[in-house]
Amino acid sequence: MITVSEPVFGVTNEGEVVQPGGSRRKAFTLIELLVVIAIIAILAALLLPVLANAKEKAQRARCISNLRQLAIGAISYAVDNQDYVMQARDIPGSNPKNYVQVCLNPPDAASAAQAGLAVQTNGSSVWTCPNRPGFPLYEPSYPQYDIGYQYFGGITLWINPAGQFPAYSPVKVSQAKASWALGADSVCKIDGSWGLPNDSADRDDIIYSNTPQHHGPTSMRPVGGNEVFIDGSARWIKFQQMYYLTTWTTDGTRIYYFYQDDLPPQIQPHLNTLKAKY
């Protein structure tokens, strides 16, 4: 009579794996494998937001460090320049002066270098948030340097839809109040939308790319931004605390927000209409 021996290696009819030497272990069924895959997917879904939040916190810390360095440099510059800080770009020929707080004129960019704040167009720079790589940019047709932050140094006039107001921005360090904003994240709404795609053929898509820098996980709506003040202090500001205080065009295409607690008395009646809104 012929007998069939147990398999030395292979899979039995009962779904058991027979290993060399005759030891047995039960194989995973398809359902068990699917359960394991589902568990891994759930864990990944739970961990990814945590990792994204950790990365964003690290970027915010680097961002606020850059702003602090800007303040230190501006104050150092003022020591050697009759108490004046470097000036944000004023549009040539504008009367009264109209300032673009996200740009510097080439002479002011050169002045910034004296204080160790080189406006360089290649490599990392303190003139931009880590969430906005690639800045500053030089545009020879204007000419101007586009920076990654809002910079309020030297601005003497605020312009917004409510009118024109004397600026409470640092011009001379000794005449500025400690709470006056010197620099801030570019929390802006461009052409009616938050965030623009990066299209190398469209200038606006490059100049206003990656704005707002700090937004929610599923949309480009801002959650807040970092700011530095003329006394060198810096902190995170929630979006809901910000105001639309100044821009260079009031047609609604360039809306910029930042926070300041000391404001011109002339602007106080308009704060409700200038308050940050999505």
Image (tube, rainbow, N blue to C red):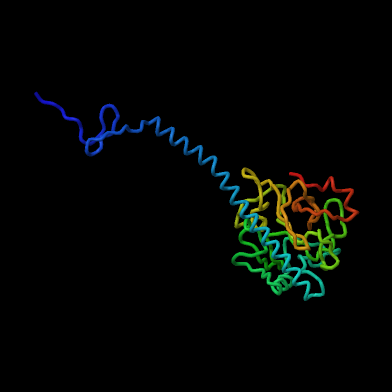
Residue furthest to the left in view is 1
Which residue is located at x 65 percent, y 51 percent?
A: 196
Which residue is located at x 78 percent, y 65 percent?
A: 153
Residue 270 rendering spot, x and y as whole percentages: 87, 48
* Residue 66: quarter of image: bottom right
In the depicted structure, whether residue 12 falls above or below residue 118: above
Which residue is located at x 90 percent, y 54 percent?
A: 265
* Residue 110: quarter of image: bottom right
Q: Pick the quarter of the image with the C terminus.
A: top right
Residue furthest to the bottom in view is 80
Marker count (numbered): 0
Asked whether 180 or 98 is in front, the reply is 180
Q: Pick the quarter of the image with the N terminus.
A: top left
Residue 44 rendering spot, x and y as whole percentages: 51, 41
Asked whether 80 or 268 is in front, the reply is 80
Residue 177 rendering spot, x and y as whole percentages: 84, 61
Residue 89 rendering spot, x and y as whole percentages: 76, 65
> In this rendering, would 128 be left or right of 44?
right
* Residue 62: quarter of image: bottom right
Asked whether 130 or 189 is in front, the reply is 130
